[in-house]
């Protein structure tokens, strides 16, 4: 009764074939990441030292450290976060919880998707026009961060909206039925259950801005500065631009410097991603439904 | 009007004022009409049963009472549903209306918060902040829903960790925490075991002293046990309204009513 027919055998063979195929694809995907990381650690690892991380560059950037660039990147990302996260979350809450389903809302959603597709160099030029010139921030951390913020807004909105919509509609309806207003429902039921997703999504997406070069190079990031920035209206060095500079713009650059810079940059991004993933795993364990 | 005075006199609720006046109500989703020509009065301190097979329009009716049509742009309601004499569609303060009408759904929707928070939510929405006041309300509502003894030691655990029957009583406690004047239950026993069902039925009989109850049920015997008067919905129409016992033993206007309550079709 349970002897395998030729059809069973055939299905089984196909199943093994597809498993092997899909597994190989996954392997191919992992390969480049592994190779890049290995290369960076092998070539850039020896450059990493306390001095490299915490002192400024010397001798035309061929020696010394990267501290001004490291600090600059952290500042740029932080200021960008402060600008984009409240704005993006507010917009996402409106779009998810309040906006009626009409042509206007659909147009806004379309605009958000398109904004995400705008090339970063275009954002850079927009930043120059809007923040550097029109608002007269000059080339500064503020102008660069706001440019980054505009660029990350769509991903913040999308990440937030997805977290909000992961909260089942039945919870909202139960709450509305008790006589709660939309805002009471959002505050008491929707946000407490979406906040973990929002948080992790936002960290994950925004960490990418650490590596952006084009939007900051015309708006606030400098080639080389002898002093650290004193306010958000000063220019700053940044890791991504520094990497570009030391790899292509400076003659007689020792090999380990650009690799070291790249290793630090990728470490920051990976660190933030791991943080986000760890947070997500921790909070998922506390899920309430 | 389908409700005649003699029937009311029999049920002993003739003098009670009308809590929910339903007049020629029709409900449709886009082009599809799911309910039409429904008229009856629900009087104060009665349990009003609504029976009928699936797709008879029972749940849609409850949604219309609570103005849930506001959440569904394809749903339109015609006619008049008067709560305390005021057409619900003319009520400006729809939040106040919903607060006065408690709803219990077929499948319990425990909000993703603790047992305590579930019951304290509605009082909090009304602006009650003091812990001592909330404690009193939570205990009273859980007691009235026959749940207190089972959860009094785990008020801080998640509502969703309770058993199905407990969760349903939690949603009843939550509805009671609104201090409603009207409680509408939509097939509350669908996910509940028979013993718990009986306990909830006892609770409803007691609650009747204080509030008005609309009970939508698939179980005709449940309607017979609980409801003072019952409406029979069939295929989007209200074919019968009368004193419950009459549906089973007395005169009926439509022979399908007798067929349904005796289980000849369903």
Image (tube, rainbow, N blue to C red):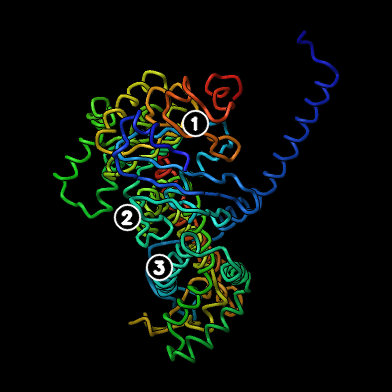
Nearer to us in this view, B26 or A250: B26
A254 horizontally vs B126: left or right: right
Q: Quadrant of the C terminus of chain B?
A: top right
Residue indicated by mark 2:
B96
**Mark 1 element type:** strand
Residue at (61% x, 37% y) in the render: B235
The reply to whether callout 3 and callout 2 are in contact (CB within 8 Å) is no
Q: Is residue A29 above or below residue A62?
A: above
Q: Position of residue A151 (x, y in %)?
A: 53, 72
| Precedes in sequence: disc 1 or disc 2 | 1
B14 horizontally vs B242: left or right: left
Q: Which mark is residue A86?
A: 3
Write down the chain letter for disc 1. B
Nearer to us in this view, A283 or A259: A283
Residue indicated by mark 1:
B51
Write down the chain letter for disc 2. B
Q: Nearer the viewer, mark 1 or mark 2?
A: 1
The alpha-carbon separation of the residues under discs 1 and 3 comes to 50 Å
Q: Which residue sits furthest left?
A: B132
Nearer to us in this view, B96 or B18: B18
Q: Is residue B211 above or below residue B260?
A: below
């Amino acid at each position: 009764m349970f002897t395998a027919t030729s059809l069973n055998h055939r299905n089984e063979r196909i199943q093994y074939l597809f498993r092997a195929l899909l597994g190989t694809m996954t392997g191919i995907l992992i390969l480049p990441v592994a190779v890049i990381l290995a290369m960076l650690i092998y070539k850039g690892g020896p450059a990493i030292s306390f001095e490299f991380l915490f002192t400024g560059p010397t001798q035309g950037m061929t020696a010394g450290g990267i501290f001004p660039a490291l600090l600059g990147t952290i500042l740029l990302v932080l200021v960008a976060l402060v600008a984009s996260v409240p704005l993006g979350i507010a917009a996402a809450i409106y779009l998810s919880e309040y906006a009626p389903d009409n042509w206007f809302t659909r147009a806004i959603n379309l605009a958000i998707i398109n904004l995400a597709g705008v090339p970063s160099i275009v954002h850079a030029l927009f930043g120059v026009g809007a923040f550097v010139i029109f608002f007269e921030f000059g080339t500064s951390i503020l102008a660069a961060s706001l440019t980054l913020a505009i660029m990350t807004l769509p991903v913040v909105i999308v990440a937030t909206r997805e977290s909000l919509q992961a909260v089942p509609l039945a919870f909202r309806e139960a709450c509305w039925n008790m006589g709660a207003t939309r805002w009471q429902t959002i505050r008491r039921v929707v946000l407490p259950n979406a906040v973990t997703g929002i948080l992790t999504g936002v960290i994950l997406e925004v960490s990418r801005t650490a590596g952006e070069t084009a939007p900051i190079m015309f708006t606030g990031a400098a080639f080389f500065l002898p002093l650290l920035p004193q306010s958000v209206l000063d220019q700053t060095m940044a890791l991504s631009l520094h990497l570009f500079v030391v790899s292509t713009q400076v003659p007689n650059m020792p090999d380990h410097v650009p690799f070291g810079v790249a290793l630090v940059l990728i470490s920051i991004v990976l660190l933030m991603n791991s943080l986000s993933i760890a947070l997500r795993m921790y909070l998922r364990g506390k899920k309430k439904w | 009007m389908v409700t005649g005075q003699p029937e009311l006199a029999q049920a002993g609720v003739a003098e009670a004022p009308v809590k929910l006046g339903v007049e020629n109500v029709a409900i449709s989703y886009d082009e599809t009409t799911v309910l039409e020509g429904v008229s009856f009065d629900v009087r104060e301190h009665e349990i009003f049963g609504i029976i009928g097979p699936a797709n008879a329009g029972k749940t849609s009716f409850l949604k219309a009472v609570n103005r849930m049509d506001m959440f569904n742009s394809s749903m339109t309601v015609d006619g008049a549903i008067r709560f305390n004499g005021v057409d619900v569609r003319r009520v400006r303060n729809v939040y106040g209306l919903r607060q006065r009408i408690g709803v219990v759904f077929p499948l319990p929707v425990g909000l993703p918060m603790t047992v305590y928070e579930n019951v304290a939510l509605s009082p909090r929405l009304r602006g009650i902040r003091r812990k001592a006041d909330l404690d009193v309300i939570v205990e009273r509502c859980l007691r009235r829903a026959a749940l207190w003894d089972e959860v009094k030691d785990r008020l801080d655990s998640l509502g969703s960790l309770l058993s199905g029957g407990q969760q349903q009583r939690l949603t009843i406690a939550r509805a009671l925490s609104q201090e409603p004047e009207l409680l509408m239950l939509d097939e509350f026993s669908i996910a509940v075991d028979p013993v718990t069902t009986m306990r909830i039925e006892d609770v409803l009989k007691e609650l009747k002293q204080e509030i008005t109850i609309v009970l939508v049920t698939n179980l005709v015997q449940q309607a017979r046990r609980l409801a003072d008067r019952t409406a029979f919905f069939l295929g989007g129409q209200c074919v019968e309204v009368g004193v419950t016992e009459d549906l089973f033993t007395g005169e009926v206007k439509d022979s399908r009513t007798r067929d349904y309550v005796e289980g000849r079709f369903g």
